[in-house]
C-alpha cells in the first residue's frame, strides 16, 4: 500500500507464472484472475493492469495473441483497463500482470487482524495444483480438469464485495503457499492460533483421490510441507495423507476470511447474495502459540 491522501491509498501487486493448462486463452484468463486476487484480498478495487510477458520468439504469435486475449477478457470482466506492459524473448512462456488498485486508508484488510474466537470462512475449493499436475501426465479426468479450470477462472471480486459489506478482521487469498501456508501467515501476523477441520475443507472433484490416494504431488506441495509442518498438530483420527491436499499449492484460489462469530452469518449471507458458489466454515481462531494450527478430522 502507498497512501496518497488522507482518504486514498494505492494497492500494488504483481504475479506471473508458466502455463498450467494447455489452452492459451484459458491460461491467460487464469493468470489475470490470479494477478487481480491480491488487490481483492486487501479489500481494494483494481483500477489498472499492465501485462508481463515472456514468450519464445520461435513460437507461433497466434499463441501469444490468445494468451493476451484471455487476460484482456478477464480484466474486462473485472472492469480493469490494461494500460501497457512489457514482453521479453524467453524459452518458456510466462504471463501475468502488475495490478494497481485503490483502497481507503484504515479500511484495508490485512492478514494481521485475526482474533481468538473468529470464524474462518473459505470461498473456493482446494486442489488446483494436484489436478493440473495430474492433467500434465494424462491422469486427471476431463470432469476434474473442467472443475479446476472453472474455479481458477472465477474472480474474487464478488467475494471481496461481500466482505466489504461486513468487514472481516483479517483476510488473505489462498495461492501458492497452500491453505495451511497462507493460514499460518495470517495467524503468525495476528499472534494467534487456529483449529481447522479437514472434513469441512471443500475439495475440487477428484482432488482427494489424485492427491492423497494416488499421491500426485505438485512441486510446491513438498516445499510447503517442509516450510510449515513445524507449526502443525494433527489430532488423532485425522487421515495420515490429508496433508497432501492441505499443502497443495493453489492458483487463483479463494479468499480466506477471519471474522467474528457475531458477523459470520452476515458474511455467509452476503457471499450467497453475491453468488459466491462456495462459502465454507473451515475452522476457528484460538489463543495460543502464534502461527500454530491444530488439525482435526
Image (cartoon, rainbow, N blue to C red):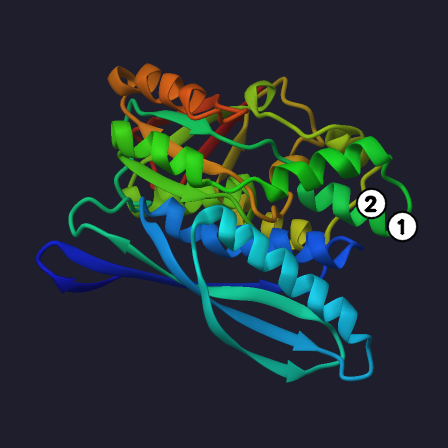
**Residue visible at 72% across and 33% down?**
147
Q: Can residue 244 be seen at all in this image of the molecule?
A: no
Describe the element under mark 1 as helix, strand or loop: loop
Which quadrant of the figure contains the N terminus?
Answer: bottom left
In the visual, does 96 lie left or right of 129?
left
Which quadrant of the figure contains the C terminus?
Answer: top right
Q: Quick check: marks 1 and 2 in contact, CB under 8 Å?
A: yes
Q: How far across and how far down the image is residue 165, in percent?
A: 27, 29
Residue closest to the eye, 193 or 8: 8
Q: From what the image shows, is residue 123 above or below residue 200?
A: below
* Residue position marked by numbered label 1 in the rendering: 137
Q: Say which quarter of the image contains residue 287.
A: top left
Q: How far across and how far down the image is residue 8, in percent?
A: 17, 57
Q: Residues within 10 Å of mark 1 (few under 14, many from 20)?
A: few
Residue closest to the eye, 213 or 129: 129
* Residue position marked by numbered label 2 in the rendering: 134
**Residue visible at 31% across and 44% down?**
43
In the visual, does 140 lie left or right of 34?
right
Q: Say which quarter of the image contains residue 55.
A: bottom right
In the visual, does 59 lie left or right of 186?
right
Q: Can residue 188 be seen at all in this image of the molecule?
A: yes
Describe the element under mark 2 as helix, strand or loop: helix
Q: How far across and how far down the image is residue 62, in percent?
A: 77, 70
Q: How far across and how far down the image is residue 102, in percent?
A: 27, 55
Amino acid at each position: 500500500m502507498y497512501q496518497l491522501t488522507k482518504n486514498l491509498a494505492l494497492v500494488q501487486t504483481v504475479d506471473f507464472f508458466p502455463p498450467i493448462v494447455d489452452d492459451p486463452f484459458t491460461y491467460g484468463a487464469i493468470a489475470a484472475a490470479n494477478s487481480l486476487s491480491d488487490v481483492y484480498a486487501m479489500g481494494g478495487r483494481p483500477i489498472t493492469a499492465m501485462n508481463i510477458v515472456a514468450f519464445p520468439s520461435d513460437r507461433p504469435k497466434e499463441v501469444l495473441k490468445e494468451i493476451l486475449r484471455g487476460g484482456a477478457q478477464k480484466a474486462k470482466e473485472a472492469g480493469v483497463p490494461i494500460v501497457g506492459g512489457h514482453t521479453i524473448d524467453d524459452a518458456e512462456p510466462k504471463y501475468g500482470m502488475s495490478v494497481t488498485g485503490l483502497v481507503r486508508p484504515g479500511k484495508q484488510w490485512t492478514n494481521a487482524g485475526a482474533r481468538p474466537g473468529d470464524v474462518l470462512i473459505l470461498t473456493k475449493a482446494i486442489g488446483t495444483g494436484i489436478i493440473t499436475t495430474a492433467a500434465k501426465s494424462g491422469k486427471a479426468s476431463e470432469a476434474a480438469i473442467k472443475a479446476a479450470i472453472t474455479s481458477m477462472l472465477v474472480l474474487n471480486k464478488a467475494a471481496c464485495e461481500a466482505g466489504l459489506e461486513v468487514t472481516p478482521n483479517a483476510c488473505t487469498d489462498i495461492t501458492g503457499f497452500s491453505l495451511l501456508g497462507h493460514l499460518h501467515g495470517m495467524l503468525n501476523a495476528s499472534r494467534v492460533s487456529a483449529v481447522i477441520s479437514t472434513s469441512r475443507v471443500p475439495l475440487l472433484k477428484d482432488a482427494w483421490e489424485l492427491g492423497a490416494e494416488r499421491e500426485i504431488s505438485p512441486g510446491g506441495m513438498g516445499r510447503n510441507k517442509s516450510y510449515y509442518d513445524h507449526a502443525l498438530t494433527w489430532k488423532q483420527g485425522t487421515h495420515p495423507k490429508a496433508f497432501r491436499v492441505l499443502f497443495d499449492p493453489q492458483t487463483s484460489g479463494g479468499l480466506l476470511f477471519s471474522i467474528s462469530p457475531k458477523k459470520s452469518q452476515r458474511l455467509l449471507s452476503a457471499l450467497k447474495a453475491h453468488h459466491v458458489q462456495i462459502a465454507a466454515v473451515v475452522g476457528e481462531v484460538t489463543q495460543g502459540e502464534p502461527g500454530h494450527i491444530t488439525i482435526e478430522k
